């Protein structure tokens, strides 16, 4: 099959798109938002030239939908939407895109019933890692720190701010060897959380992240959502794939998918963060054991090969707007046990409505 992706995003270029190519599918990735701004006709030309079986979009930022959906309707090409910003932007971003898409995937299991209530079938598809890219590489002295965090300052999200207070602030207050990498928003004192210049390590290209993960003793994790049973930062899977020892703020999703002190380590308080960092810095063999276990675990269950198989299998079900009356929806079982490593799901037949 031929897939045209409209987003130049690591989840596509190093994730799903890359893996579909490895599985023998034909993939083209374009920056549709930029192309449409520069030349409104260029997007339609790209679609006509490639002649895809499916056009795929991720996230839902910008006004891409206003441009792309009329083109796809004229050409009769189905649209696939991966709602990777759920649940935070379900109403503002995801739902408008999903209403015009024939296949919908979400990273947040709790949103599936919300889609269902709108007559939209949705499939659960989490973030993952790509072993062909996310693996250990030669350490670089630039990143030889006790603790690092890689990501941007999204302190406007309450869960993220809470994570900063639990994970970053106590290490800063105790003057640990910590570096934070990301956009320079970290230095903006008008933000709800900011850091001093000596802690800021600068921006980091995506291709450099695996080197950073392979070099630091402890990689720290933050999440913008702390209520979802499945949604978490994509860095969780990527850093574990790179063989990092990962210490993260606790969320239900992290606990549902991973085992504490086996695949990674989580903290629920500033004091616990300090205790965990002190404990594991003094025990490199334990750090390495957990890092190896975490890498083996995501390689066994959470790679983009797993996601691509889920993705391709979902495309075998009837699309919205087809002649079929029923599709399939996957939702978290009401008896979901958070101690399980694999979620129980139930398959539900739903009446499909054409939005």
Image (cartoon, grey):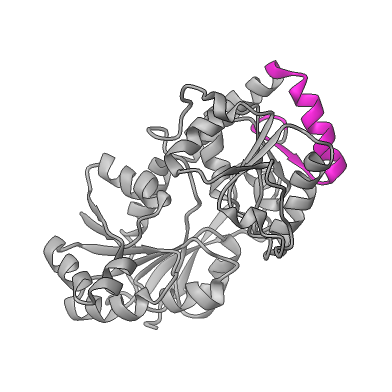
Left or right: where does residue 153 sit relative to residue 112? Answer: right
Q: Position of residue 174 (x, y in %)?
A: 84, 37
Report the residue at 49% width, 74% height from top: 93
Residue 318 appears in the picture as rendered: no
Report the residue at 83% width, 42% height from top: 173
* Residue 31 inside the magenta-drawn segment: no
Q: The N terminus is located in which quarter?
A: bottom left
Total numbered labels: 0
Residue at the outermost front position: 197
Residue at the outermost top position: 285
Report the residue at 62% width, 58% height from top: 333
Q: Is residue 87 above or below residue 239?
A: below
Q: Front-most of 170 and 127?
A: 170
Q: Position of residue 113 (x, y in %)?
A: 56, 71
Q: The C terminus is located in which quarter?
A: bottom left
Quarter holding residue 327: bottom left
Q: Report the magenta residues as a range.
A: 261-285
Left or right: where does residue 36 sit relative to residue 336? Answer: left
Quarter holding residue 96: bottom left
Left or right: where does residue 1 sit relative to residue 187? Answer: left
Q: Front-most of 25 and 346?
A: 25
Quarter holding residue 321: bottom left
Residue at the outermost right position: 271
Report the residue at 75% width, 18% height from top: 283
Q: Is residue 12 above or below residue 172?
A: below
Q: Position of residue 73 (x, y in %)?
A: 24, 80
Q: Position of residue 76 (x, y in %)?
A: 20, 75
Residue 32 appears in the picture as rendered: yes
Q: Front-most of 92 and 176?
A: 176
């Amino acid at each position: 099959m031929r897939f045209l992706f409209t987003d130049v995003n690591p989840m596509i270029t190093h994730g799903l798109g890359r893996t579909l190519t490895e599985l023998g599918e034909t993939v083209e990735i374009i920056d549709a938002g930029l192309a449409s701004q520069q030349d409104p006709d260029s997007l339609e030309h790209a679609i006509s030239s490639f002649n895809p079986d499916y056009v795929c979009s991720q996230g839902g930022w910008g006004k891409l939908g206003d441009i792309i959906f009329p083109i796809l309707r004229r050409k009769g090409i189905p649209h696939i939407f991966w709602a990777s910003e759920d649940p935070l932007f379900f109403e503002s971003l995801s739902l408008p895109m999903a209403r015009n898409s024939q296949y919908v995937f979400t990273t947040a299991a709790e949103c599936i019933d919300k889609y269902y209530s709108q007559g939209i079938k949705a499939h659960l598809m989490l973030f993952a890692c790509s072993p062909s890219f996310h693996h250990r590489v030669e350490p670089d002295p630039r990143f030889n720190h006790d603790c690092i965090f890689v990501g941007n300052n999204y302190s406007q999200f309450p869960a993220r701010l809470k994570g900063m207070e639990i994970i970053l602030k106590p290490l800063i207050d105790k003057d640990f060897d910590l570096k934070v990498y990301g956009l320079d928003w970290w230095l903006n004192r008008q933000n709800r959380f900011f850091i001093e210049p000596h802690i800021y390590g600068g921006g980091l290209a995506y291709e450099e992240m695996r080197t950073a993960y392979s070099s630091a003793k402890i990689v720290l994790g933050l999440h913008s959502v702390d209520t979802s049973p499945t949604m978490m930062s994509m860095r969780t899977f990527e850093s574990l794939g790179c063989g990092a020892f990962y210490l993260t703020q606790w969320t239900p999703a992290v606990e549902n998918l991973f085992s504490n002190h086996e695949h990674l380590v989580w903290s629920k308080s500033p004091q616990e963060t300090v205790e965990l960092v002190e404990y594991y810095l003094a025990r490199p063999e334990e750090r390495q054991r957990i890092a190896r276990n975490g890498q083996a675990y995501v390689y066994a269950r959470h790679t983009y090969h797993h996601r691509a198989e889920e993705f391709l299998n979902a495309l075998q079900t009837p699309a919205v707007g087809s002649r079929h009356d029923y599709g399939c929806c996957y939702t978290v079982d009401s008896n979901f046990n958070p101690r399980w490593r694999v979620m129980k799901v139930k398959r539900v037949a739903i009446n499909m409505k054409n939005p």
